[in-house]
Image: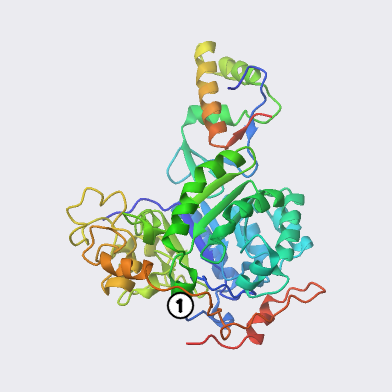
Amino acid sequence: MITADSRPKLARGVRLQIDRVRGGFNLLAPEHVLRVNASSAAILELCDGQRSLADIVDVLASRYAVDRGRIEREASALIDDLVTRRLVERP
Amino acid sequence: MTAPAPFALLAELTHRCPLACPYCSNPLELDRKADELATADWIRVFEQAAALGILQLHLSGGEPAARHDLVELVAAAAQLGLYTNLITSGIGLDKARLSELAQAGLDHVQLSVQDVGAANADRIAGLRGSHQRKRDFAAWVIDAGLPLTVNAVLHRGNIASMSALVDEVIAMGAGRVELAHAQYYGWAARNREALMPDLADALAAREQLPALRERTARDITIDYVPPDHFARYPKPCMNGWGRQSLNVTPRGLVLPCHAAQSIPGLSFWSVREHALDEIWHGSPAFAAFRGTDWMVEPCRSCDRREIDFGGCRCQAMALTGDARNTDPVCVLSPFHDRVEQLTTAPRHDSYVMRGRPPRTPDRTLSPPERDDADDVEAQRPAPAR
């Protein structure tokens, strides 16, 4: 499980890219494409290995008028799921 | 019917290859170097692919490193935002050129490995010294900071070493391994009795898999492609014909799958004459088996028709003589006994090597290293037909 001081980043060989044909975003990985929506993309583009989860939640809370607790739950769930799928690392 | 945008394009840059694997799925008749698409043709195809919605570009062959313009092609694809995956034997690419590929924006390398021990691996590849060269190459990939997948084709000649093979792949630094049972297309069909494992060995491999995954979970992801001849239902070949991906052959024909040329009566359009979106949406070969309208019974009324799409058209063609039939791997197929005949047929261990007479593993990878894949084709006698 991810904690507030984890500094998640996309795994090696994984990148986030806008999809100009279908709309939305994709996580591109070896032999794998995961379609992600705009709110997941907003979280993932902050996963740079430098920011902690707490930092990421701060940035998003200041950017969108959404409750901090809800952002934290959403970000944690997303990152935990992607760690399981080996698309995100939390060193 | 209107097809949704495809996700993946397999660019078979060349059929030239320094290896001679008995399980090669390329067609019996290979495209010649003189007929290969030019650099500008491929770059135009990549541009059209990106515009069509392609996300993943697999650069394959043959050995793609036999193309002298490989770095240029990777750079062009990377600039278009395509996720570029180099599918290579590791032979014919030195450290400097690999580093150029990384600089050009290559995303990922997939390296083929034949077995865990050099002697048997070199026997399967038909090239002495190849396995050690692959170990060196894997180290260069890691040094270049590129993610590495190793692909090992499993067959009766190496299935007993599956677990040791995974350990070897971990030692090579790969984050992912594909353990893919041999499939019997193209050249591989000639070696079916030498490739197909005995039922007991295929079952043993499957039973071993969960423990192997658990033991290595911290080090590697294992993708396993089961041997479809021993399955109850067919594989969802290509996840459906003309549904997600397309292949471009060295001379520019666009195919719905790698082996589609084995189906008579399909005409394939060329990127020399048509744009890729025109081919994807309009070419008769893509329309032929798209969706479910083409199906005959038992597929037509089957609950699984949108799960496995009737299996593999090329296998239906090869084993029943009609590509519309249910893949005979399926237990519901009236031709399923033909698969049983194959799985119970006597086996042997003598390969018909690609491009050379049988049982002459005599070629050696000669130092110093050189980019000799161009010359290999000329040195090798024509394939036995």
Q: Position of residue B82 (x, y in %)?
A: 56, 52
From this view, report whether residue B315 is shown above or below residue A88: below
Q: How many marks?
A: 1
- Name which residue lies at 59% across and 57% down: B161
Q: Nearer the viewer, residue B307 or B125?
A: B125
Q: Quadrant of the N terminus of chain B?
A: bottom left
The chain to which mark 1 is attached is B
Amino acid at pointer 1: Arg
From this view, report whether residue B267 is shown above or below residue B331: below
Mark 1 closeness class: few <14, some 14–19, many ≥20 residues within 10 Å: some
Q: Nearer the viewer, residue A6 or B185?
A: B185
- Name which residue lies at 62% across and 67% down: B64
B254 on left or right of A27? left
Q: Is residue B162 visible?
A: yes
Q: Nearer the viewer, residue A89 or B232?
A: B232
The furthest residue to the right = B368
Residue at image mark 1 = B190
From this view, report whether residue B307 is shown above or below residue B318: above
Which color scheme did the rendering employ for the protein? rainbow
Q: Position of residue B152 (x, y in %)?
A: 57, 59
Q: Position of residue A73 (x, y in %)?
A: 51, 17
Q: Position of residue B101 (x, y in %)?
A: 70, 58
- Name which residue lies at 79% across and 61% down: B96
Helix, strand, or loop for circle 1? helix
B140 on left or right of B327? right
Q: Nearer the viewer, residue B280 or B246?
A: B246
- Name which residue lies at 47% across and 79% down: B28
A11 on left or right of B369? left
Q: Is residue B283 visible?
A: no
User: Looking at the rendering, which quadrant does residue B116 occupy?
Assistant: bottom right
